Image (cartoon, rainbow, N blue to C red):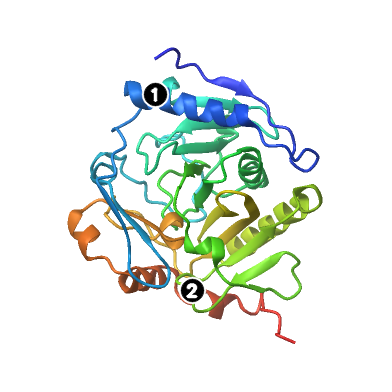
Amino acid sequence: MSQTRPTTYELTSSSTDSRTDPELQRLLESTWSERHDAGVGFRYRLHVERERIAEGKFNFLILLNRKRLTERRQPQAFQLDAPFDPSRFNFTRVDPAEVQLELVAPSPTTILINNSPVTVYHSLVVPDRAGQQSQLLTSGGVRVAFELLLRLPDRRYRIGYNSPGAQASVNHLHLHLLRIDTELYVQRAELLPVRGTPLLHRLADHLPAQGYCFVLRDPTTELEHVCNGLMKLIQALAEQQMAHNLFWSWTDLHRGGELRALVFPRVTQCVNKAACSFNAAFLELCGFVSVGEGTDYDRLTEDAIVQALREAQGDVYGMLDGIFPVASAD
């Protein structure tokens, strides 16, 4: 490998400059590929043994990746209000070879390889790594998620986040950046406007997961409003002690279209005790199911996945309709 030292890079604000940034994408992909091909920093070489689309209305993508289950770091157990604990593993302890980029704007953010990848170019986005923040999403984390997807020319990139109590595995603020080549149901999911909150919608009742969605159409006029609205929603969930998963995705993988920021609250927090074959985290809630056992790969059906997602979330709408009511049809 030619080098393992991270590159410092500056993002310009998408609220004033709408251009994509091919150099950013080149750096992300080349630094990831160099390390992966040389076996530097990774726990295993990414190898998806099999994949299929589950029969049904929602086209769940199911993949078999055994090494993700057997080789990944065991998740930590912690709840929503757990403070950062410097004595436990955190991202200040990673091998320097795992660091791909240091972004200096819009706020200091480190891009690390995910050493147990689910997809190609699966990286970790760590805002203010030296600040040692717990895994509660900050305004800086929200903003950099939008900025990265707005800048990357390839619209197959997505970003996800698991809060404490919602399958987060390390209590140090981080998001996941990964490329998914398949369309997921959340890109085309029916949305219902929420009364009193501009740009906020709720997923229709017939969908597999219960959640909310901010839609960004024009970054130059809407980005600040969407970021602020998303943070208010996250803070409202924290006040209710509701864990949550987030997912950012373009609606069109070729042209981009609209950028959706989806939020999936959970009525009851979960505690990670060990890695398992099927988890209801941000990927699964959005239609991407990576399993680590062949029996799960063979037997999982759309109905079984939907049931698992609904059991993981509980009756979110029943709990939150008083706070985020759907606008009436008339």
Residue 101 visible from this viewpoint: yes
Q: Nearer the viewer, residue 310 or 64?
A: 64
Amino acid residing under circle 2: Leu
Q: Are marks 1 and 2 in contact (CB under 8 Å)?
A: no
Residue ID at (55%, 68%): 189
Disc 1 marks which amino acid? Answer: Arg
Which secondary structure lies at badge 2? Answer: loop
Of 272 and 18, which appears nearest the observer?
Answer: 18
Q: Left or right of 63: which side holds 283?
A: right
Query: Residue 256 at x, y = what percent?
Result: 62, 50
| Residue that extends furthest to the bottom in the rendered view of this protein | 330
- 118 lies above or below 304: above
From the image, which quarter does the N terminus lie in?
A: top left
Residue highlighted by disc 1: 35
180 horizontally vs 15: left or right = left
- How far apart are labels 1 and 2 at the CA level? 39 Å
Query: Where does label 2 land, which residue?
Result: 207
Q: Residue at x 33, y 74 (%)?
A: 303
Location of residue 110 with respect to 321 vertically, above or below: above
Mark closer to the chain start, 1 or 2: 1
